[in-house]
Amino acid sequence: MSTTVLVADKFEKIGLEGLKSLGAGFELVNQPEAGAGDLAAAIRAANPTVLIVRSSKTPKAAIDAAPALKGIIRAGAGYDNIDLAAATARDIAVCNCPGMNASAVAELIFGLLLALDRRIVEQSAELRAGAWNKKEYSKARGLKGQTLGIIGAGGIGREVIARAKAFGMHVIAHSLNMTKDRAADLGVEFGGSTRAHMLDMLSRCDAVSVMVAANAESERMADAAFFAAMKPAAAFINTSRGSVVDEAALAQAIKAKSLRVGLDVYAGEPAGGNAAWKSALADLPGVIGTHHIGASTDQAQNAVADEVVRIVRVFRDTGRWENRVNDAGP
C-alpha cells in the first residue's frame, strides 16, 4: 500500500532528498506554498498518510480533509500551530523535532542582547542617515558581570547558559521543573519553579530571556506583575511565542520603566513569509525586533530536516512515531 508524504511548507533540499530515498511505496508530494493558501484543499487532493508543516496553521478542517492521515510532523520544536485535540481525536500522531534549533535560537538571543546593550540598530540607522553621534553611543553597560535570568531551561536554555558563561555573565535559571540539584548540574543559580520564585528572580536580573513552550500555563505569563518585578532599564528578550507576553503590559512597562526589549515573536504575527503587518511595540523606543527567525539558520534547518526524515523512516520500519507530543486517541 502506497504511503503519501505531503510537504506543505518550504523544506530543505536535504530533507526532500531524504524523503525521496525512502524507496518504493513512498510517494512525495512537495507543495511548499500549500500552507500559505488553502491547506485543506491541498490535503484533500493529496490525501497524505504523513503531513509535514513548519509554520502553517493546521486546523481541524485541514486535518479532517485527509482520511488516510496517520501522522503530522512539525519541522521544528513548537507545535501550537497544529490543532492537537483534532489530531488526537482521530489518533493521528503529532511529532516535533526538539532541540534541533537550540543553538540557532541561542545565537539570536545573544545577538539581541548585544544589539540592545550597544544600541547597534540605532547607531546603524543614524549612520545611514548621515549622522555621526559617537558621544551618544559611547555609553554601554557591557554584558560581563551582568545577571541574566532565563525562564525555561530546556535545550535552548542550556545553549544560552553556555554562551552566557562565555560572556562572563551570572545566570539564574527558572523553570517549572527546576530543582536545586538541576541548577547545580547546569552551573547556575537556582531560580525556582513557582511564579513567586520567578518574580523574585526578575527583581535581581539585568536581562531576562524567555524560552518556554506555548501552552495554557505559559499564556500571558509575562504580564503586568511580571514587568513590575523587573529592574528599571533591564533587558527583556522573547524568542518563544507571542502568546507568552501581554503586549499591552509590556508596552506600558517600556514607557514607565525604560525596559530595553528584543523580540523575535509577536501576538498575531503573520503565518506566511511575506505580509503587510504592523506591530505597535516596534515603534517604541528601546525595542528591536526580528521576523520570527530564531531557528532560521542553515545548520538548524538541515538538522530539523534530518530529524523529520528519521521520524518518517522509523514509522516506515516500525510503525512507531518518534517524538510524539500527543496521546494516542480513543
Image (tube, rainbow, N blue to C red):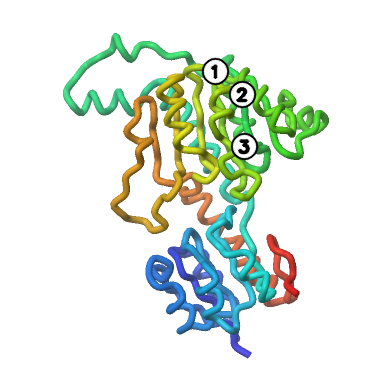
| Nearer to us: label 1 or label 3 | 1
Judging by the rendered image, the residue that carries numbered circle 3 is 159
- Looking at the rendered structure, the kind of residue marked 3 is Glu
Judging by the rendered image, the residue that carries numbered circle 1 is 231
On residue 248, which mark appears? none
> Is tag 1's residue or tag 2's residue first in the polypeptide sequence?
2
Image quadrant holding the C terminus, namely bottom right
Residue at the location (58% across, 57% down)? 79
Residue at the location (56% across, 48% down)? 101
Q: Secondary structure at mark 3?
A: helix
Residue at the location (63% across, 70% down)? 87
Q: Secondary structure at mark 1?
A: loop
Judging by the rendered image, the residue that carries numbered circle 2 is 202
Above or below residue 83? Residue 28 is below
**Quick check: 95 left or right of 289?**
right
Mark 3 neighbour class, 10 Å CA radius: few under 14, some 14 to 19, many 20 or more: some
Above or below residue 287? Residue 154 is below
View extreme (top): residue:
135
Q: Secondary structure at mark 2?
A: helix
Query: For residue 23, what is the image quadrant?
Result: bottom right
View extreme (bottom): residue:
1
Image x and y of residue 243, in percent? 52, 46
| Nearer to us: label 2 or label 3 | 2
Mark 1 neighbour class, 10 Å CA radius: few under 14, some 14 to 19, many 20 or more: some
> Is tag 1's residue or tag 3's residue first in the polypeptide sequence?
3
Mark 2 neighbour class, 10 Å CA radius: few under 14, some 14 to 19, many 20 or more: many
- Looking at the rendered structure, the kind of residue marked 1 is Lys
Residue at the location (32% across, 33% down)? 283
Decide which of 112, 203 is in the foreground and name it. Answer: 203
Please say if the residues under marks 1 and 2 sit with CB atoms less than 8 Å apart.
yes
**Quick check: 278 left or right of 190?**
left
